[in-house]
Amino acid sequence: MNLEHLVTTPDIAARRALGACAVLMVGALTLTACGGGSDAKSEGKGGKNPAKTSAAEIAISAKNGSTGASINSTGVKVSDGTLTGVKMTAAGTGQTVPGSMVAGGKSWKPTEQLERGTKYQIAATAKDSDGRSVAAKSVFTTVSKANSFIGTYTPDNGTTVGVGMPVSFSFDKAISDKKAVQSHITVTSSTGQQVVGHWFGAQRLDFRPEEYWKAGSKVTMKIDLDGVEGAGGVTGVQEKTVSFTVGRSQVSTVDADTQTMKVVRDGQTVKSVPISTGSPEFTTYNGQMVISEKYKKIRMDSRTVALANAYDIPDVPDAMRLTQSGTFIHGNYWYNKGNPPFGREGTSHGRVGLQDVKGGQGNTPAKWFYDSSLIGDVVIVKNSPDKTVAPDNGLNGWNLSWNEWIAGSAVSTS
């Protein structure tokens, strides 16, 4: 028996083991000890192995490098974890975009609508239930103004309007896919009245029921146009719900023959007042007209309605717009005292005048009617030698029959 072999063999084995350990330390940074029966795992925070990937997954809705991101729905979500921090900034300016965590830290969204055509950056961190962290970042650009459209609408959220007030959208781009756009705007009434949209050309869409809104009803319009393609390469950016209330019913009828106006509220005549319609040279439109704007004082310049230098009155009191082309019902303090009194003769340039005083502060028919009227109230003119007002001249679609109205819808009403 070779005693030397018996002595040296273990020593050689030990040297080989130490060499193997050195190789492992170079090849695997996670191993910090070899042999001796010690645990080879390094435990991080909470006693967990940091080498293990976090179970949390962050999803930023706007992909890194993308363009055309939504200005409404861009945000951050996390699955199998909780968001620990989100910072959103406008690239270039470094301005922080305010936002809020929702759903217990499962998602984050900006508190304000983003700007169109703007570059943003989002940096987010999250952790899973074992405390392991993960991070994500995205730099993106929102949809440009050239490639998007918006609709300016009336009435505003939370307002109270008259029974004749339609919902009216004016789009800043021509819409070629009218069906797609109209089908993503829904208007409903608490009374269950059927509401149908009607297109006036390529950039205006109005909604109304067959008859005036029921007094006291609540009307809700849901705008779901974000990402909807309205024309080639042009998408919507709006996403919101708007509600308004219909007040009492007030419909006033101007009779150009008798030069009087009868005001009917909730089915009862409350007052009949003298008025002055257009002169034989400048007649007043017939038809159903809706009050769209109110001004306690406004300048009226004939040059803005192509009547040369016929008049320029800087302080017309108690004025309410009936058409976009310039028809108003308003106070008149300059009525020629040599003329017959109000209620005898039409002397205006197509508008409807009521007796008033300068400044509109007196106890006059004009001030009473102004104070008694809502945006959306109806003023009907009859027996004038002029034509019926065009339905798209102001908010005056009531001059179309119901069949004519629904014929202008891009969405089936059956």
Image (cartoon, rainbow, N blue to C red):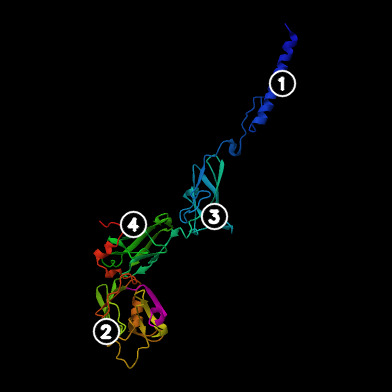
- Comparing labels 4 and 3, the label whose residue is closer to the camera: 4
Amino acid carrying label 4: it is Lys
Label 1 sits on what residue type? Arg
Q: Give the number of the mark in front: 1 or 2.
A: 2
Counting from the top left corner in percent of width and height, residue 194 is at 27, 60
Residue 79: x and y, percent?
A: 48, 43
**On the image, numbered disc 1 is attached to which residue?**
15
- Tell me the SS state at disc 2: loop
Q: Are marks 1 and 2 in contact (CB under 8 Å)?
A: no
Mark 4 or mark 3, which has the lower sequence index?
A: 3
Whichever of callouts 2 and 4 sits on the residue coming sooner in the sequence is: 4
- Give me the C-alpha separation between circle 1 and circle 4: 82 Å
The residue singled out by tag 4 in the image is 179
Q: Quadrant of the C terminus?
A: bottom left
Q: Are marks 3 and 2 in contact (CB under 8 Å)?
A: no
Q: Which residue is mark 2?
A: 259
Q: CA distance from mark 3 to mark 2?
A: 62 Å
Q: Which residue is mark 3?
A: 120
Quick check: 19 above or below 10? below
Classify 128 as above or below 349: above
Within 10 Å of disc 4 (Cα), the crowding (few <14, some 14-19, many 20+) is: some
Q: Which SS class for mark 3?
A: strand
Q: Tag 4, which secondary structure?
A: helix
Q: Which residues are magenta?
A: 290-307
Q: Secondary structure at mark 1?
A: helix
Contact between marks 2 and 4 (CB within 8 A): the answer is: no
Question: For residue 373, which quarter of the picture?
Answer: bottom left
Give the Cα separation between the discs numbered 2 and 4: 45 Å
Direction right: furthest residue: 4
